[in-house]
Image (cartoon, coloured by chain):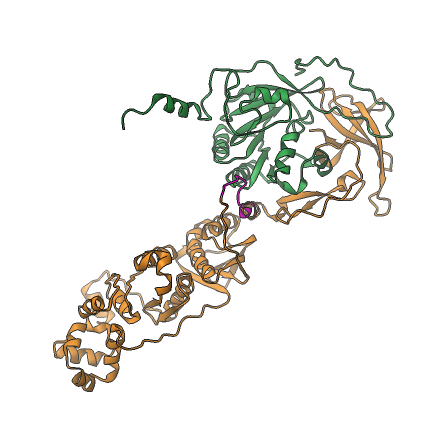
Amino acid sequence: MAASAARALAHDLVVRPRDPAEETEALLGLAGWAGQFTPSVALVPYAGLTLEVSGSLRLFGGAGGVLAALREGCAAIGFTALAAAAPTARGAEWLARAGVERVIEDAGELAAALASLPVRLAVREADTLEALDAIGARTVGDLLALPRDGFARRFGRALLDEIDRALGRAADPRAFHVPPPKFHARLELPAEVTQAERLLFAAQRLFVQLEGFLAARASAARRLELRLFHRETRMTAVPVGLVAPSRDARHFTLLARERLAQVALPEPVRALALAVDEVAPLAAETTALFDDGHGRPEDWARLVERLRARLGAASVHGIALADEHRPERAWGERDPTSAAGRKKEEHEKPGLRPFWLLHEPQPLAEVDAVPCYGGRLRLLAGPERIESGWWDGADATRDYFVARTPSDALVWVYRSRGERGGWFLHGLFG
Amino acid sequence: MGIADPTRSLAALLARPDIRLGRAAAQVASPSVPTGFAALDAELPGGGWPTGCLTELLPAHEGIGELRILGPALARLSRANRRIAWIAPPHLPYAPALDAAGIALDRLLIVRTPSAHDALWATEQALRSAACGAVLAWPGAVKYAELRRLQLAADSSRALAVVFRPPRAAGEASPAALRLALHTAAGGIAAQILKRRGAVCERPIVVPLDPPRAVDRAPSAPAPARSADAGVCHA
């Protein structure tokens, strides 16, 4: 029926043209995701996927379990799946296309189920369909009732073979899909999105697809990139760094939420893509026999990732000792996720050091040669002479003292002997 | 099934961390980390810093030993390979001093946050992650509802969760299970328990902290000339 004729009958009809290229891309994406169920996934052009799952039945609790997992996964990616299981690929394909979502385990049952399906599933040519209709053959069962020799002469050998493959009487070899080494998936948004946070729902679908893709190759992603496409050709890239390789869609979603919250969109977003270039093998998870309450090692990497995703990598760090006499350089930042740092060397034991070091030494007023911080300080211990750094320009000659403030706090102060003389507060004995 | 055993349901009720018993420090088998100070352990329910609930410390001001009082517990946790997250500390946690106190530096995570809101978020993340053995947070001014969120996050964790708050917060209601106001005292720090499970503790507990030793080569410094009458609080 022409679209104009259909509109005449139903005036509020919405007509959408089919886009074969996009359909194929969507199917290829699903094929990559479905690789987690079986390595044998074949595309049925513009119609669906066939999966050879006989090796996976035990893992998923039978064909019904596989179908349930497939439907659930497709829904999370944003598709509605019609799924059926049968002993032959073509049989399952016909059942699914006819909307008969059954699990059929033996050949006899399959023949009976296929017999009630309409002939259009087996026949693509319009004139053959018309001819079959003319002789009153409307179901696959009607075709089977016709004499084979006459049928082959009248309609061609190909159609007979097609039916034989569906019933398992003839071999039905398929070319299985080989997923690309890198992951890339794109999603057109139904409407333009102006706030980055709103993209999370769509991104979630891509993450589920990625999870399946990674599971199929027993690997994990090291780094993700979300690409937000605007009008024209502009694109905003949102990289999501991972400390430890991961393939958990929920974890990806949590990280993306923090990253997207920081993104200011220059223009509304029309499409979203997820790209993963670096894929690393992921060791199978071993769960501890006894929960020792220390969390799993990946919990730590995930916490650091989440904090960094929101606060920036520079704001989340560990600390380590450094070989330096100047107190402000006697420590350094370290990567909190790297394995335990260098073997602890015998550091020269310094004098008493405070738990808190000020970011910048704070100049103190001096009254009668006594430094003041909320009142006159009483010097308890010192001086500890630190003289260093004449070679790098940050020359320091200081006498450090432990002092008590009038309000009984202990502070770490020094008297600078260089050009920048006077008293400074450098630490607090917290 | 008949009627539930009343003694069992009562025991279950009393085991809830938000129920306070009118006895002395409630004798509960709640998980805790020894503070390293016998006087303090004796007054804390569970015999140490409680884990899996929120603890508030309200130091009178900075530099009175608000970290040194946690030092032995942090050293113990870090030696047991537990991670310690420092969220929005007011100054730089100084590595040489922490190392000297026996705290394993490679177990520490320092998180700087641009706002109080981010500090609360980061604290909650650290508590909700099973990765941390202790979470120390300086969130600044916080509302009751925000503390409540932290308390819930602490409830679900097994970490020692400590929030540092200004002394004026002592008068405000708080969902924290343990609240200590800290003041200076002769020879250490006086901890006044504002809230704990169990009876009210009127008497401040004096915790002896190492007095600063005279550093090498130092001339004899004027020692703190104070009578060491324990139990007296110099607030």
Q: Residue A399, located in which quarter of the rendered image?
A: top right
Residue at the image point whose x is 72% and y is 21% from the top: A408
Residue A4's place in the image compared with A393, above or below, is below
Magenta part of the chain: A290-300
Residue A8 x %, y %: 20, 66
Query: How many numbered markers are drawn?
Result: 0
User: Does B189 sit left or right of B128 as displayed?
Assistant: right
Residue B78 x %, y %: 63, 37
Q: Tell whether position A415 is magenta.
A: no
User: Does A151 sit left or right of B175 as displayed?
Assistant: left
Residue A211's place in the image compared with B65, above or below, is below
User: Does A61 sit left or right of B181 as displayed?
Assistant: left
Q: Main secondary structure of the magenta part?
A: loop
Using the image as rendered, state which of residue A184 and residue B132 is in the foreground: B132
For this orientation, the residue located farthest to the bottom is A153
Look at the image and give the colour of chain B: green
User: Does B151 sit left or right of B34 as displayed?
Assistant: left
Residue at the image point whose x is 54% and y is 63% from the top: A277
Look at the image and give the colour of chain A: orange
Residue at the image point whose x is 75% and y is 23% from the top: B211
Q: Tell whether position A298 is magenta.
A: yes
Residue A175 x %, y %: 39, 74
Residue B81's place in the image compared with A224, above or below, is above
Using the image as rendered, state which of residue B185 and residue A191 is in the foreground: B185
Q: Quadrant of the C terminus of chain B?
A: top right
